[in-house]
Image (cartoon, rainbow, N blue to C red):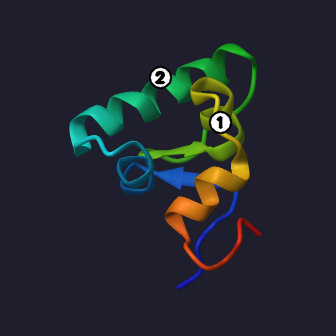
Amino acid sequence: MFKSTVLLSIADVMTVTGYKRARAGSIVARVNACTEKQGFITPRRGCCYIKAFCQMTGLTRKEVLEVIRPGKEGE
């Protein structure tokens, strides 16, 4: 199955943050609200852009990808 390197699902946010589904869902909603406020189109329900997530959390894209896709070296 193809895994996007542009979008994070709620399950991905759960893996990165260690939070449960409800908290991860609220994080995705906040990231999407920020994205929409900046004038960008938000992705499908239950997903957010990795770039926006990284800006809000202070993590790098490589750090996020290493956690959710171990062994891929953050491609």
Distance of label 2 from label 1 (alpha carbons):
13 Å
Q: Would residue 18 be found to the left or right of residue 28 on screen?
A: left
Residue at image point 59% right, 80% down:
2
Spot occupied by residue 45 in the image (x, y as percentages of width and height) = 44, 44
Q: Which residue is mark 2?
A: 30
The answer to which image quadrant residue 38 occupies is top right
Q: Residue at x 51, y 63 (%)?
A: 68
Which residue bears the numbered disc 1? 54
**Residue 10 point in image, percent of width and height:** 39, 49
Q: Is residue 36 above or below residue 5?
A: above
Label 1: element kind: helix
Disc nearer the start of the sequence (2/1): 2
For image coordinates 24% across by 44% down, the residue present is 21
Q: Residue flagged by tag 1: what amino acid is it?
A: Cys
- Residue appearing at x 64%, y 29% in the figure: 58
In the picture provided, is 15 more to the left or to the right than 5? left
Q: Which residue type carries mark 2?
A: Arg
* Front-most of residues 72 and 38: 72
Q: Quick one: which residue is furthest to the top in this view?
A: 37
Q: Residues within 10 Å of mark 1 (few under 14, many from 20)?
A: some
46 or 10: nearer the eye?
10
Dot 2, how many residues are within 10 Å of its Cα: few (below 14), some (14-19), or many (20+)?
Answer: some
Tell me residue 51's x, y (percent): 71, 40
Residue 12 percent across, percent down from the top left: 44, 55
Using the rendered view, name the quadrant where residue 5 is placed. Answer: bottom right
> Position of 22 compared to 58: left or right?
left
In what element is the residue under mark 2? helix
Q: Which quarter of the rendered picture does the C terminus lie within?
A: bottom right
Vertical side of 22 occupied by 73: above or below = below
Asked if disc 2 and disc 1 are in contact, CB closer than 8 Å, the reply is: no
The relative height of residue 3 versus residue 19 in the rendered view (above or below) is: below
Judged by depth in the image, the label closer to the viewer, 2 or 1, is: 1
